[in-house]
Image (cartoon, helix red, strand yellow):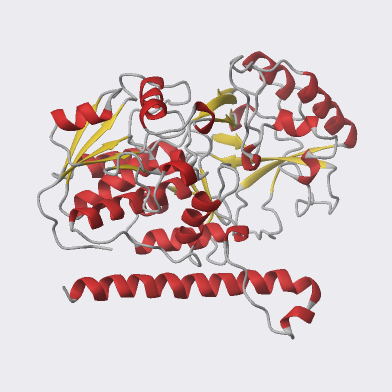
Amino acid sequence: MNYENSKNNRVLVIGAGLAGVEAAYCLAKNGVSVLLVDSKKSSPNPTQSLDGFAELVCTNSLKSKRPESSHGMLKEEMKKLGSIIIEKALEAAVPAGDALAVDRKFFSEKITDKLLSMEQIEYTPIEISDPTTFMKEHHCDSLIIASGPLTTDPLANWIKDNLSDGPDDLYFYDAMAPVVDGDSLDMTGIYLKDRYKDVGEEIIADYLNCPLTKEEYELFVDDLKNGDKTPTKSFEKPKFFEGCLPIDLMAERGVETLRFSCMKPVGLERADGKLPHAVIQLRRENLLGNAFNLVGFQTRLTHKEQLRIFRKLPGFANAKFFKLGSVHRNTYLNAKKLLAADLSSKKIPNIYFAGQITGVEGYTESAAMGIVAAMQVLRKIRGETPLRFPVESAIGALINYIMTAKDAVPSNINFGLFPLPILTKEQRKIGKRKKDVKKNMICEIATKSFDQFLAEQFFSRSNK
């Protein structure tokens, strides 16, 4: 969505991750001066390895791009709003079946080059510990905090002291999966196949699959449960996001848990037609095709234990890892208590929040909140009332979730966040297909409501 140039204002954006990039880009292309600051060069955190903006630290996948999926719907809405993240992700895409996965380095480079080429954006690599003082010194009218899941301690402490109601609303734990060198694997028993998809001679599958027998699987589960874990800080109670649990924690929930989650064999029959007891899937990480992410293998295991345990797996005896898994503290707010519906602080209204810190989980979800925060700032600059995204849309459903959830638990976009559609008497009688009918109806309603929302915004602005 493009607007005419705004009056002279300057906005400080803290954080050059996915949300910060979207916010800065949206503001700049609408004629607003942006001061973009990021602490990576002065205070890098352990998960970061690239110099540029929009680094993907946990996985290279932005999840499904199918338009009939909740993640696909969110991507379509972001595209309609001019998302730079989706645009550059498509340009940096690597084969990943129905998922949108990217070459992380290429993706980051393209976004960094684009933002640094925009004359409205001034970039400063610095750590900020007192945002309001910094705003005054640099003549900024508004602030968007998009500091991400690993907000630096000085900034997190400032937020806790000035904007929050207590430290319990400011963290949960997340984990990162390892990345292996594909050339170091013994491919004897490993095969190419995409789940549920038959691959012909002209089409090469995107995923490697390492099958495990019942004995190999159960030994692996025991190793995960008994392996040494990285300890958390004594004063913090670990609060893990259910959609990204460490594999060792899932193993502790029961011997069959992994077989019904990241290691499920369904749809991954071998060439002889037999279904393995369990399967480890490996997704391509880069365009070169030599780096593979162990899907769902985020872990609390120490690096030493990861090497010991993973190298016992079939084909992994000589495995070399580009990156090992890790656990890190993620910072987020209890949005319902601390933020207004336009993502501004209830205590200091010219401060907005964007990205995972608002209480969403996932790359595209975080980026979408960056667009929303920027659009709300634009509305405020022009003296207009805040936007209200329809709750039937993907973006609206996310905002509604963080503003109404009983407990502040980060969430991905999913069909459970959308209003339930009303089925006819005939539709209620179709049994197992009812779930698919509901999803199709949600998609249709979401698309219609979002398109109507956009049309109304364009119409209202063209008549002013």
In the foreground, 445 or 276: 445
Residue in the picture at 60% in, 26% down: 325
Q: Quadrant of the C terminus?
A: bottom left
Q: Is residue 313 visible?
A: yes
Residue 207: x and y in percent read: 63, 46
Please name whichever residue, 361 or 262, is drawn nearer the observer in this view of the structure.
Answer: 361
**358 displayed left or right of 3:** right
x 77%, y 37%: residue: 189
Q: Is residue 67 above or below residue 232?
A: below
Residue placed farthest to the right in the image? 215
Kindly give the residue lying farthest to the bottom in the view shown. 426
Q: Position of residue 39 (x, y in %)?
A: 32, 25
Q: Where is residue 376 drawn, in percent x and y?
A: 30, 54
Asked if one can make out residue 110 in the rendered structure from this viewpoint, the answer is no
Q: Is residue 20 left or right of residue 240?
A: left
Where 29 sits versus 51, above or below?
below
Image-based side of 152 in relation to 456, left or right: right
Q: Is residue 45 above or below residue 119?
A: above
Number of residue marks = 0
Report the residue at 48% width, 46% height from top: 336
77 above or below 92? below
Pick the front one: 331 or 164: 164
- Give the position of the N terminus as an image quadrant: bottom left
Question: Residue 227: image x %, image y %?
Answer: 75, 18
Outermost residue on the left side: it is: 8
